[in-house]
Each structure stands twice: as C-alpha cells, then as structure tokens.
Image (tube, rainbow, N blue to C red):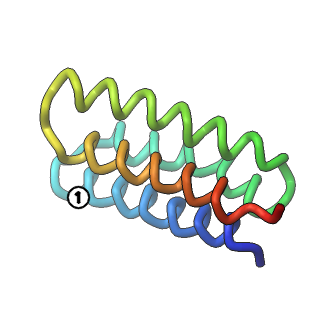
Amino acid sequence: MSAPIIVLWIYIVLLEVGGVVGFLKAGSKASLIASNVFSLPLILSALGILPPGVADGVLALLLGYMGFKFAKSKKFMPSGLMAILSVAALVLRFMLAPK
C-alpha cells in the first residue's frame, strides 16, 4: 500500500470518528450522514475503484467548505480541525506521491 493511500485511510477514519462524535455529543444526524457521504468516494478511491483525483477533489471540497465554515463561525471544533486535516492530507498525498 502506497503512502498516499495510507494518508487517505487515516483521513477516512478521522472523518468517520468525527461524524460519530458529532452524533453522540450533539445528536447531530447531519454530522453522521455527511461523514458517511464524503467517506464513500474516499474509500472507493483508496480501494482503486475510483481514480485518485476523485479523492483529491473531495479533500479539496471539504477543505473549502470547512475553511469557509471556520472563517464564518471562528469555532475551531469541528470545522477548523477538519480544514487543517484536509490541508494536511492533500499536502501529504502530493508530497508522498511516487515521482
């Protein structure tokens, strides 16, 4: 398994855990549903069913959305954390990609 795929799996786990925590702590069904919806194309990409560009696009979409939400609310949790994790995942995937 390549390093960019490992980074993607770590991100998927963190995304799913965040959705479950949001549901358990705040009763947010939207958190749970969104984490599952966004994890699906990431999982399919990690398994090689979808091209890697799909995962990068989903990560960029989540970065944009969570970054916007953080800028608007100024609340670090969960949007600020997810924006930072999305940047980290994108950067690591590009840095660790085979040349």
* Residue 34 locus on image (x, y percent): 45, 40
- Kindly state the secondary structure of the residue where label 1 is placed: helix
* Residue 55 locus on image (x, y percent): 68, 46
* Residue 10 locus on image (x, y percent): 52, 69
Q: Residue furthest left?
A: 74
* Residue 80 locus on image (x, y percent): 26, 43
Q: Is residue 30 left or right of residue 72?
A: right
Number of residues whose C-alpha sits closer than 10 Å to that of mark 1, classed few (under 14), some (14–19) or many (20 or more)? few
Q: Residue at x 77, y 78 (%)?
A: 1
Q: Residue at x 27, y 59 (%)?
A: 21
Q: Is residue 76 left or right of residue 37?
A: left
Vertical relation: 63 (above or below) 77: above
Quarter of the image where the C terminus is located = bottom right
**Total marks drawn?**
1
Q: Residue at x 16, y 48 (%)?
A: 26
Q: Residue furthest bottom?
A: 1
Q: Residue 6's quadrant in the figure?
A: bottom right
Q: Residue at x 75, y 54 (%)?
A: 44
Q: Residue furthest front?
A: 99
**Disc 1: which residue:** 24
Q: Is residue 75 left or right of residue 58?
A: left
Vertical relation: 39 (above or below) 66: below
Q: Is residue 30 left or right of residue 28?
A: right
Vertical relation: 50 (above or below) 64: below
